[in-house]
Image (cartoon, grey):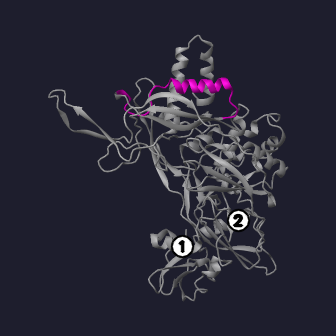
Amino acid sequence: MISIVPLRLIVRAPYASRASETGAIGVDFPLARDALGRVMIPNSLVIGKMADAMRELRDLLQGDPLEDEFKRDLAELFADDGTERSEERDEESDGRDARRNLTASDFVLQTEERPTGMRTRIAIENATMTVQDGMLQVIEQPFAAGTELAFDGCLRVFGEISDARKARLRKALAFVTQVGALRSVGFGEIVRLEDGTAIVAEKRELPEAPSNKVLLRLSFEDVFCAGEARNTPNTFTSADHVPGGVIKGAIARQMLAAKARSGFLDEAPEDLFDGDVGALAQSFSAVRVRHAQPVPRTQMHRPYRYLPESLAAIDGPDGQPCIVDLAGLVDPSAAVLIDGQVPLAPFDWKQKHLDAALALMGVGEGPSRVLRIRTQISEDNRAAMTSRLFGVEYTRGDQHDFLAEVDLSSCADPEATLRGLDEVLTTGLGGIGRGGAYAKVSLEPGCAAERSQVGQRVVAVLQSPALLRDPSDPSIGLLSAYANAFAELGLPDCWRLISVFARERLAGGTFFRNRLEGAGGRYAPWLLTEPGATFVFECEDDHTSWPAELFARGLQVPLTVKLHNGIESVPKLYRVCPYLPENGFGDLVVDPFCIGGVPVWQVRSPTALGLAVEPVGDFGPDRGGEG
């Protein structure tokens, strides 16, 4: 569970907390605002101020019984072991460092703003006592000096919180005298701290779960950073969805924190959880969570968002892009001209081609992004620390909900596991991604089991990255490598992989090296097959149907891939490898896109559109389409 402590912070104007983005023309210092344009005190600033206040109170109360209480709060809530974070320490991290069990929302201004308002500052030349050249600063200030500004927000604590600890948190925040920038000239004076409106969790009924599947809806208040990629060591870019592994990790952390524990859920004592939550804990590794994809707030089904790599574009008679699906060709891997044109693959598309494809497939736009800059402040001189400036490109969560499918079919007791999941998520889910974003959670009816596909040809498209093939032998062509992978995963002999359209990338780095070496493994970069990869299978037996149940729970990691990465003997694979089907990866879907109920590879094949197809060459015995 999550304990929520709503608070109101009263600040006397002028107030200034700088935005990461540029402001209006002529404004040097725009105020930080949330995704809806409301003036705010960023959550990271609130947490940083509280941690500093607790350290000061701890030092001031030496010899007092409260000193030990504040020490315990710093260790358990702020993961403060007495040492400052450093670049060297980050380089050695394997992701298993203690994490904060206290997070906060942004504190959003409730006081009405004036339409406009600016303040200016100047720098004076000591020698001449005149204004220095170019040293005029314009500060956005949409409220009159002396106005009391009400900022509403809340603190969130993993697990239950005692009244005594809640009082210490309030004492720490009340000990802060100023918030924001320009404190040396009187900005951001904190007047008082008030209680906010209590939040009561609503009772809800469990949804029906056909095939033991339910939908998990995440509703964020503002922004999150999950499944991030690093552009540089101190810049992070969020994915536009929430990976299943991030969701599972947040659930496990929340369960353990409720019992004042941390670490791995499968290391918890058997008697730590009981009842339905115990059933969830015992079957947790068998729970599969597909990635949570963005949907409009009223949408009730989880969408497919990654277009097949078998799509291609040519110019139509009207000069507009014409989208075709090469998986519908008699020989999908053959090099062809279509209406005398070389078809453009997705990696060569311009924006007009992508827009045409998205419109054809009914794929909506994803959420937009927000950039925030953070810096770590030294306790000694209260200045920004060297090399401790971070840029985070967050995903806006206020425009969409995010739907994930939870598959409980492999759990020992799916019904009890579902009840346990509902109990854990009653107060929402925290600790999501970088910064520990929070989302309200609802469980909704899932979809029925996928029907078996019957036909001579089946086209399957990846909807999340997958660890599929062993890259150790470069002499093996792309088609043969993937054919070997599917055979290893149990594809029946009567089915044959005839074509592959795929892009791949390497993932890894210091973080994974530290984790693998710590588990006794051997580091090698992961070779990921990107979402959108398209696999065309054909059957050599007219009476054999596609075994839909074979990959219904995602693609497992083949043994040859484990051998290549030195993890074949790791007993608990999730500890070193995140790219598992239980975490939403390897999500292979048959015919994810249809037009008028007909698979897109049939209705948009060049021959179905009446286009002329002219073979122009051969890739050889191991031709495999796009590599």
Please tell me whether mark 2 sits on a helix, a strand or a loop.
helix
Q: Is residue 74 visible?
A: no
Q: Whole-Å distance between the Cαs marked 1 and 2?
A: 29 Å
Nearest the viewer among 57 and 572 is 57
Residue 454 picture quarter? bottom right
Residue stretch in magenta: 158-184
Is residue 155 placed above or below 348 in the rendered structure? above
Residue 466 location (% of width, % of height): 64, 58
Residue 412 location (% of width, % of height): 85, 50
Q: Nearer the viewer, mark 1 or mark 2?
A: 1
Residue 543 location (% of width, % of height): 82, 80
> Does residue 180 show up magenta in the picture?
yes
Residue at numbered disc 1: 357
Q: Quadrant of the N terminus?
A: top right
Nearest the viewer among 87 and 475 is 87
> Does residue 346 show up magenta in the picture?
no
Q: Name the amino acid type tagged 2.
A: Phe
Name, please, the residue furthest toward the left: 128
Nearest the viewer among 207 and 270 is 207
Residue 353 location (% of width, % of height): 48, 73
Q: Name the amino acid type tagged 1.
A: Ala
Please give the label number shown on residue 486.
2
Q: Residues within 10 Å of mark 2 (few under 14, many from 20)?
A: some
Q: Quadrant of the C terminus?
A: bottom right
For this view, does 451 lie left or right of residue 110?
right
Q: Are marks 1 and 2 in contact (CB under 8 Å)?
A: no
Residue at 79% x, 79% y: name it.
541
Please tell me whether mark 1 sits on a helix, a strand or a loop.
helix
